[in-house]
Image (cartoon, rainbow, N blue to C red):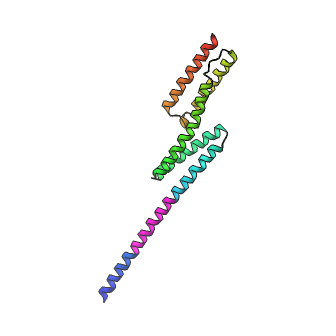
């Protein structure tokens, strides 16, 4: 009889330990799921803020924010879909700026014989060069920065030659 009570007590104890372990595992999974949902919501909100923002400086700040959030979440959350969402959002935001760079470069590289137009093109290209320098670490990596710098400097040089003719 005493032996049966000990066996029942041990079985009961094992069941309680099993239940506690299961509850802790479930809670951890719930916490992880909540973090994933929160991260996805945050990404969507930041994307919407970026799309709705008109001011370039504010757009740069939003891009900086999502880059910081991405680094933080990649170190705390091991979820590929979140990593991909952050990566795609960052690339999309960076593309917004590089398209602007390309458009500015193109529009100020168009041939003109008008000296005033050439002077304006040179000024716009110098402004573009200053812009990519200030946005370099956020929008461009070192290689892309060098590529844009070379293209812009070539355009400035070509416009300067046209102006002197």
Q: Residue furthest right?
A: 116
Please state, as top left, top right, bottom left or bottom right, where the N terminus lies in the image: bottom left
Using residue 21 as the reference point, say whether residue 102 is left or right of it.
Answer: right
Is any part of residue 50 visible from this angle? Answer: yes
Please state, as top left, top right, bottom left or bottom right, where the C terminus lies in the image: top right
Total count of labels: 0
Where's residue 135, x and y in %?
58, 34
Where's residue 33, x and y in %?
50, 59
Residue in view at x 51 percent, y 27 percent? 147
Q: Which residues are magenta?
A: 16-33
Residue in view at x 48 percent, y 47 percent? 84
Q: Residue furthest bottom?
A: 1
User: Is the stretch drawn in magenta largely helix, strand or loop?
Assistant: helix
* Relative vertical location of residue 96 with respect to residue 157 in this rendering, above or below: below
Where's residue 9, x and y in %?
36, 81
Foreground of the two, 33 or 112: 112
Residue in view at x 60 percent, y 43 percent? 62
Is any part of residue 67 visible from this angle? Answer: no
Whether 9 is among the magenta residues is: no
Using residue 124 as the reference point, say whether residue 144 is left or right of it.
Answer: left
Foreground of the two, 12 or 43: 43
Where's residue 13, x and y in %?
38, 77
Residue 118 image-quadrant placement: top right
Whether 29 is among the magenta residues is: yes
* Relative vertical location of residue 130 with respect to residue 159 in this rendering, above or below: below
* Relative vertical location of residue 83 with respect to residue 127 in this rendering, above or below: below
* Relative vertical location of residue 12 with respect to residue 31 in this rendering, above or below: below
Residue 60 image-quadrant placement: top right
Residue in view at x 55 percent, y 38 percent? 94
């Amino acid at each position: 009889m005493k032996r049966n009570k000990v066996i029942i007590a041990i079985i009961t104890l094992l069941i309680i330990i099993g239940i506690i372990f299961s509850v802790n595992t479930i809670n951890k999974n719930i916490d992880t799921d909540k973090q994933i949902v929160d991260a996805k919501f945050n990404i969507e909100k930041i994307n919407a803020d970026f799309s709705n923002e008109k001011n370039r400086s504010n757009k740069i700040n939003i891009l900086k924010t999502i880059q910081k959030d991405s680094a933080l979440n990649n170190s705390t959350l091991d979820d590929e879909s979140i990593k991909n969402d952050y990566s795609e959002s960052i690339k999309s935001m960076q593309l917004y700026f590089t398209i602007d760079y390309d458009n500015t470069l193109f529009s100020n590289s168009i041939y003109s014989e008008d000296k005033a137009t050439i002077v304006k093109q040179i000024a716009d290209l110098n402004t573009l060069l200053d812009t990519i320098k200030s946005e370099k670490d956020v929008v461009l990596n070192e290689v892309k920065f060098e590529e844009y710098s070379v293209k812009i400097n070539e355009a400035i040089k070509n416009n300067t030659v046209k102006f002197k003719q």
